[in-house]
Image (spheres, coloured by chain):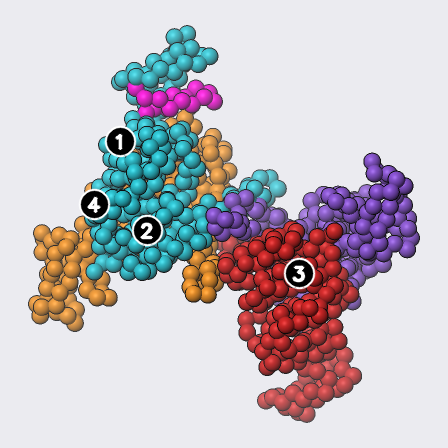
Chain colours: A cyan, B orange, C red, D purple
Amino acid sequence: MSYLLVREDREHLLEPGDTLESDLGILEVPEDVEPGDTLETHIGERFVVREPRGPDLFDHLERTGAPMMPRDIGLVLGQLGLAAGDRVLDAGTGTGILAAYLGRLGVEVTTYERDADFAEVARDNMATAGVADRVEVRTGDVTDDLDALSDFDGLTLDTGDAATVVSRAPDLLAPGAPLAVYSPFVESSRDCVEAARDAGLVDVETVETIQRGMDFDERGSRPSTRGVGHTGYLTFARTPLL
Amino acid sequence: MSYLLVREDREHLLEPGDTLESDLGILEVPEDVEPGDTLETHIGERFVVREPRGPDLFDHLERTGAPMMPRDIGLVLGQLGLAAGDRVLDAGTGTGILAAYLGRLGVEVTTYERDADFAEVARDNMATAGVADRVEVRTGDVTDDLDALSDFDGLTLDTGDAATVVSRAPDLLAPGAPLAVYSPFVESSRDCVEAARDAGLVDVETVETIQRGMDFDERGSRPSTRGVGHTGYLTFARTPLL
Amino acid sequence: MSYLLVREDREHLLEPGDTLESDLGILEVPEDVEPGDTLETHIGERFVVREPRGPDLFDHLERTGAPMMPRDIGLVLGQLGLAAGDRVLDAGTGTGILAAYLGRLGVEVTTYERDADFAEVARDNMATAGVADRVEVRTGDVTDDLDALSDFDGLTLDTGDAATVVSRAPDLLAPGAPLAVYSPFVESSRDCVEAARDAGLVDVETVETIQRGMDFDERGSRPSTRGVGHTGYLTFARTPLL
Amino acid sequence: MSYLLVREDREHLLEPGDTLESDLGILEVPEDVEPGDTLETHIGERFVVREPRGPDLFDHLERTGAPMMPRDIGLVLGQLGLAAGDRVLDAGTGTGILAAYLGRLGVEVTTYERDADFAEVARDNMATAGVADRVEVRTGDVTDDLDALSDFDGLTLDTGDAATVVSRAPDLLAPGAPLAVYSPFVESSRDCVEAARDAGLVDVETVETIQRGMDFDERGSRPSTRGVGHTGYLTFARTPLL
């Protein structure tokens, strides 16, 4: 578990025992630090300790690629309708943002990352997010392990070969359990939909989400002139109840 | 906690001890029913027992108005970045879908509903969703109780006078805690943004989300010719960390 | 050239010499009818004569399929930036809405329709729209005539094999002349883009347009809850200037 | 009327009689220049003469503010459904892009610009676009002249006080004639809708248009990650036919 050390416009995400060195001096984070504490550097500069929340993790976790955006994480969460205690199979981990959000909500996650370096970073990120006990980051390709995986309450995929895993969803998931695939391209989304249909999944759909900010100023109200670009298509499906 | 009893194209959401009477006969749900069990009516017709998941609750909870859609629930979840154990203040409850989703994810919810009948339905819905111990539905207007409420980890509002509550957010929320307001109209969203700015909140933004289905058939791939209409604007903000 | 005969909630689009028979009696449209005239049926019921405008033609022309919407016609017009007197090659004609709009704006149109019955209806529609002298509807497949077609100021395509024509655009169009392809599907749009790039065209782009109505009522202002579905992708390109 | 002089990656929009001075030497544009001619500078560097098309005018006209985009010009054209010879009342002129597009399509335009300097630039732009004989740029506020204006076939507005003019539309327009208002803000769009309803106009609607480019590359097809921002709302209405 980590903590935010905040002072004016500075923010640092640190764990108990960490040392922060900056132009404001050296600060040691005590093992028993708690939100609300005030810590001082060796030259007396003060930082306030805060509990990091989801958006803080999103900003501070180490990135190994473009992480899934809070918007897309949310759409997955809303569509899957998971419960704390559910077991979710995830691939590929990447930065681990989705896994961290799931873990924080009490979901048990088994996540696969093919790149060993990325997997190592993701493990550190899970520790930082305080979910190392609920998120297991496995180094490797999930498609190699499919025969050994079963009875999950949800499946989340952000990999190039997601369709291969989707086609095995009936073996991987409990009855009625949902899956979500994030894919930037029409073609890969289509592949997943076809794999889902061929596998007998139900409630198969692909959605694209366009989100626009609203500007409110003294002249009036309008959608932002700054556009919001495409992130990815989300494909959803469920295993049949029977 | 309730269970899905499933048979061909029939689905019933029932609790242990409930009795189902239909043209297929009478079926009593045992107190010790578990997912995977097969139950028989008194004339031998079989139903399989399944664990209801989020989408099932969305379909089966009793509605007292237009419930927030899974899409919007998800966007709130993704933006708030809550963790199991967080305490959230919610108003107005309505059908209680958002509260049920939050409760299932381990969040402790205090939710206000002004309409006593709606509140009663919402309480039943929380029991059905198995979250009665984590979601407290209070009958009344949250604005009457603001002085007694504090230190929440999140605030979610779907009421006509949300701006009034937003202006008190610094007193209601812990430092850095997020809020989300769902409002169908530009004017009420603008009111919330102005209230948030006046209250010194940070990361204030209003977004509109347009979601389109994709159609994949033998002729090709395209966005759905069935349009998806507006549900509501979502306004987000956080209390300052300091 | 045709005229609108209007009375309360009735509208008829008729040409000089036509006879209108209805429960209000028989009305003969004089050859010298003019907008502003009042005409009477043989039992004295009155109709006012109005000049039909673009939206009236859209509503009253005989349809042989789903016509291009005014929105998409407009996007083509805006992107092509044509001038009165320009020569445009069009295929397939369909109902002829795009051709009629172009003809009304002084553009000379040569349009191909493979279905002989549709072509005949389109010719009638051009007469109704008063543009028969500026729009030539040819029965046949434009791809059969490509060698005989050249020096057009614009090319507009709404056919399944548009990419074939796009690949010949440098021969069909004057230097710097624009083209527009309307296609419902991602795959056919992509084919056109690839054909355009291979043919050395410039300013190649495909756009998708989402249009939403706004609802203004006493409760507030918001995007319509009635969604607007996908019509088609528009692909634009130009021949090089040199 | 002006012409494009093109050479490799250079383009100049010049009128007959103009002189182009550059590092490639001095070039005089003959009075009898025609598209397809090749012109030489005094040191023998060659430029090819091309007819400028709508998109070229959009790129080369002198700007006095943010011009209406081809997309929005097109949506206005498509919705209004004008014909060559129609008379349109326009305010405020701005750069004059909309007026130039209308004039090129044979529409007679009377356009008002309050800023005398902007009006002068717009007059030059109309000459450059070759539509000076069809577009009259008047310096002044259209609201001062409303009593003297009538019987137009269309009305296009891009001014802050558009609602004032909309309320007078029944006096300004012929029966059944359309109007379009471009306004960036919700509030001003709403004002126009209310003015239109109060004035007894029909087919009153406000639309917002979101346009996204598609990216086609070797990895697949997807909407552009570059977002497209809001330009403005378009409000449409017509005078009643009776």
Q: Which residues are magenta?
A: A2-16
Sequence-first tag of 4 and 2: 4
Q: Which SS class for mark 1?
A: loop
Q: Residues within 10 Å of mark 4 (few under 14, many from 20)?
A: few
Q: Which SS class for mark 2?
A: helix
Task: Give how far across and how far down residue B59 sits, in percent.
Answer: 29, 57
Task: Give how far across and how far down residue D108 sits, in percent.
Answer: 79, 62
In contact (CB < 8 Å): disc 4 and disc 2: no
Task: Give how far across and how far down residue D56 sits, in percent.
Answer: 74, 51
Amino acid found under the numbered disc labelled 4: Ala
Disc 1 versus disc 3: nearer the observer? 3
Identify the residue under disc 3.
Answer: C169
Pinpoint the chain carrying mark 4. A
Q: How many marks?
A: 4
Residue drawn at point x = 56 percent, y = 66 percent: C161
Residue drawn at point x = 74 percent, y = 69 percent: C108
Q: Residues within 10 Å of mark 3 (few under 14, many from 20)?
A: many
Q: Nearer the viewer, residue A17 or D133?
A: A17
Q: Which mark is residue A132?
A: 1
Identify the residue under disc 4.
Answer: A148
